[in-house]
Amino acid sequence: MGTDRIGRTRLGVLLGTGCLVLAACAPATAASAAPPERAPSPSATPAPSATPAVSTPGPATPKTTPRPSASIGKSEGTLQVLTFHGHVEYGGATSRANWLAPFEKESGCRVVKLDRVRTGEEMAAKLADGAYDVVSPGPELAGLLVAEGRVAPIDTGLVTAYRKIPKRLRELPVLRRDGEVYGIPYLWGVNQIGYEGAAPQGPAALYGPAPAAIRNTPLSIADAALALRRTHPELKIDDPFQLTPAQLDAAVELLSAGDGPDRVYWRDSLDLIRAMSTRSVSVAQATPYDLDLFRRAGRPVKTLGGVPETGWADSWMLTARPASPNCAYRWLNWMSSAQAQRAAAAWTGLAPANPEACGGRAGQMCEVYRVRDGAGLRDVFFAARPTRDCGGLGGECTDYADWVERWKSLVK
């Protein structure tokens, strides 16, 4: 999550000689090796960008009451994909991680370009310089792409598993605009506070004098704002991702108060794991998967419960003018299916958006994220791009550029 986010590394835990030993089952360098671009199948006849993905019989209907399209049109034969490292695997790291080949076999669409990046900034640059059919941005970039018209509305009637995704995820503001849907939820995660020893006195303890580990992203300012929401109600913080200048100042002040040489700003889960395994920090911002690794290794790591949490959801979007819209819709269908999300959740350590993916190798992820009964989605403030108009609700808020500037001044 955030501009400093890197691709997920699938982690394994080995217990040895009384200490926690961590091994990367698929190191980022291996899992992220880009596949070579492949030539289109000789039989493929790519459609021009203006070709619609489907044809809807009958007269046009009003935008407010869309009618589902009949079906997806004929495959154009090729597809170009942009995503984060680890979110799409083709077998380059291990043969057990490959959910691209089944898509190609089932759809008749060959992925001729699979570009994977580490940060939202890299993704934005790729989009500016290249052509893609589908993209999977984080929430801070997704909001910008929708606002600038760089992604297209999605006919959810053509996405078979869409209605199986919980309503809470389907209706995230970052994925919708003016009654249109722009993103199909894929994977999601939450930021929890983990600790060993005595329980901290609320979320604000993450910013106190004790050595702490905090995710290195401007969106971590929202976690500080959420702590202030509890301790300083006079600030009237409602949405921690939409802050007025005064609220932003207060959140950054809280972050700065406990800053020092003992604080760890982590970008990769491995950095967090190292800090916690060596007990360099006593409290940390971490995902449920990260904390579960320690518990399974016999470390008594606990989670601060009973408090709201921040989270994020990654989604799949159609670019504004995809060259292969029919293959793009086939991709949306595949990546929202239980089969694909099961593989992706097990590989990334994130929760699948489709609860039917809960089983097999993804069973542990669904357990730690409490996916099956929907409990993991409660009391979560999902990330959205901070905007001047307070997320379209009116008012005078700070935008994402303000957050980036303040974060860079804090984390030098």
Image: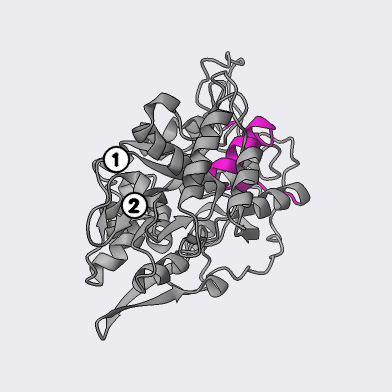
Q: CA distance from mark 1 to mark 2?
A: 10 Å
Q: Is residue 71 visible?
A: no
Q: Are marks 1 and 2 in contact (CB under 8 Å)?
A: yes
Q: Which residues are magenta?
A: 130-153
Any part of residue 91 in sight: yes
Q: Which residue is mark 2?
A: 193
**Numbered-mark total:** 2
Amino acid at circle 2:
Ile
Q: Amino acid at mark 1?
A: Val
Q: Does residue 58 appear left or right of residue 18 in this picture? A: right
Q: Residue at point 29% right, 46% down?
A: 371
**Residue 123 horizontal/vertical position (percent):** 65, 52
From the viewer's side, name the closer residue of 176 and 47.
176
Rendered position, 234 above or below 217:
above
SS category of the residue bearing label 2: strand
User: Dot 2: within a 10 Å radius of its alpha carbon, few (fewer than 14), some, or many (20 or more) residues?
Assistant: many
Q: Which residue is mark 1?
A: 307
278 and 90: which is toward the camera: 278
Q: Secondary structure at mark 1?
A: loop
Q: Is residue 236 above or below residue 342?
A: above
Q: Nearer the viewer, residue 37 or 192?
A: 192
Residue 149 painted magenta: yes
